[in-house]
Image: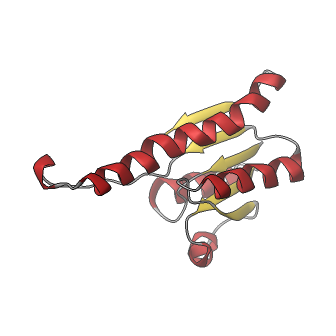
Amino acid sequence: MIVLVTGCRSGFGKLIAHGAARAGHTVYAGLRDLDTAAELLEGAPGGIVPLALDVTSDEQRQAAVTRILDEHGRIDALINNAGIAIGGFVEQFDEDEVRQVFDVNVFGAWALTKLCLPGMRARGDGLILNV
């Protein structure tokens, strides 16, 4: 399978990328900052391709999907894992903080799904997971 996973710097994203690669899949591991790729690849099995992907960037989302489609002709699975959280009392948050959470957690996942889903529907096959 050709798998795109967002938010692979650490945590679940890194674990998902490593696990999918260990299972023999080709994993495009989305990283907001490619300077962290060495950390992702440390101890990783082969089959992980670090990919510049800030899910809030239209340009980076399109470039990531285009690259994968150019190289493989399909994306079999999209795992929307990128996410951020803010803690505290709601009256303490400013609007920019809340918008950033929604941009990453909701709109980023929606936009990537919108880019990947047409190919999956055309093939009658595909998997989208929202973490």
Task: Tell me which residue sits at (75%, 29%) in the image.
Answer: 118
Q: Where is residue 13 in the image (x, y as percent from the top left)?
A: 52, 55
Q: Is residue 98 left or right of residue 58?
A: left
Q: In this view, does 2 lie to the left or right of 127?
A: right
Instruction: Determine the residue located farthest toward the front in the rendered image.
Output: 95
Task: Tell me which residue sits at (73%, 63%) in the image.
Answer: 49
Depth check: give the residue in front, 57 or 22: 57
Q: Position of residue 98 (x, y in %)?
A: 30, 50
Asked if residue 38 shows in the view, the reply is yes
Task: Tell me which residue sits at (66%, 56%) in the image.
Answer: 59
Q: In this view, does 100 lie above or below 32?
A: above
Q: How is the image coloured?
A: secondary structure
Q: Position of residue 43 (x, y in %)?
A: 62, 72
Is the N terminus in the top left, top right, bottom left or bottom right quadrant? top right
Residue 123 location, quadrant: top right
Q: In this view, does 120 lie above or below 72?
A: above
Asked if residue 27 shows in the view, the reply is no
Q: In this view, does 17 lie to the left or right of 26?
A: left
Residue 88 location, quadrant: bottom left
Q: In this view, does 91 lie above or below 53?
A: above
Task: Tell me which residue sits at (67%, 48%) in the image.
Answer: 4
Q: Where is residue 124 in the image (x, y as percent from the top left)?
A: 79, 21
Depth check: give the residue in front, 70 or 96: 96
How many marks can you see? 0
